[in-house]
Amino acid sequence: MNAAALREKGLAYLIVGPFALVLAFPFYVMVITAFKNGTEFYDSTATPYWFKHGPTWENVRFLFHNTPYTTWLKNTAIIGIAVVGITLVLAVPAGYALARLAGRVGQSLGVGIFLTYLVPPTLLFLPLYWVINTLHQQDTLLSLILVYPSFTVPFSTWLLMGFFKTIPQELEDAAQIDGASRLKTLVRVVFPISLPGILTVVIFSFSLVLNEFVYAFTFISSTGHRTLSTGVYTDLIRGDLPQWGAIMVAALIPSIPLALLYNAFLDRFIAGFTGGAFR
């Protein structure tokens, strides 16, 4: 590596390094807090950035033995997988159809669909609650499975529409000239090229399920049906004594696979957003 390349790489680390440290600091504090002894949280002589009495597994044991944490994990996974599946089934064909719909009609429909995503959730709260109440699905996982696609599908459709527009029409024409049907062309040609956009939809949809609080808190009332975002809030904050160690463990566990997923598909994730956002 020549001197110019080394200087360029060093400059990149010099610029990105401080941002990385600032962004990683909350996760560092989360890890330290997750394995701290409970008495250290109320010890004025203890530093919040390191252990005073050494790490402990007490918070992990408390979380798994004294709370239905595994049930919250299972509920979140069920809802997340269902919402991702519904979003893909609806958004992929809709995005492709709008991308291939020529003229101002397709563009106007795409913008209209995206604008529905921008409607504040607080405005949709009452009509969505009426729908759930009419269907008699209060306090069920199905209520959230029905509600969340109303947020994920519009944005995913708009994103995939822009991404599909980056795929040359000539590729599909060539496949059909060779005898492939429209469906086979989609499966063999379009979808493999569109994998970055589809992965972006999957990550976005599952992240929304993992982080959403308002609807999960309102529609679900029993502890056994709660998701992670609401279960941690209702069961680990008891009066004025939050279980800080257990809360940090509860937040850390789902963060690890999500961070690994982002890291593994970072390039495709960025390609999906940039490919769909500027068309």
Image: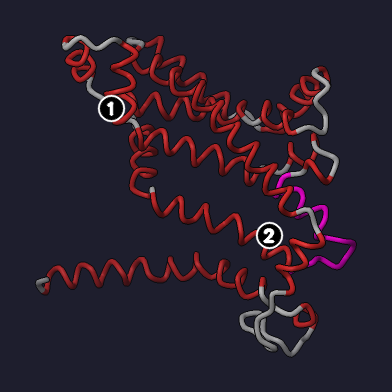
Spot occupied by residue 129 in the image (x, y as percentages of width and height):
79, 26
In the image, residue 80 lies at what x, y percent? 60, 38
Q: Which residues are magenta?
A: 227-245
Question: Looking at the picture, how far across and down is residue 32, in whole percent?
Answer: 62, 75
Instruction: Point out the frontmost of discs 2 and 1.
Output: 2
Q: Indicate the quadrant where residue 144 lies.
A: top right
Residue type, label 2: Ala
Q: Is residue 57 left or right of residue 112?
A: right
- Residue pointed to by mark 1: 166
Question: Dot 2 corresponds to which residue?
Answer: 250
Q: Residues within 10 Å of mark 2 (few under 14, many from 20)?
A: many
Judge whether 268 appears above or below 117 on screen.
below
Name the residue nearer the viewer: 73 or 218: 73
**Of the residues shown, which amino acid type is indicated by label 1?**
Thr
- Return the disc, 2 or 1, that comes first in the chain's sequence: 1
| Viewport quadrant of the N terminus | bottom left
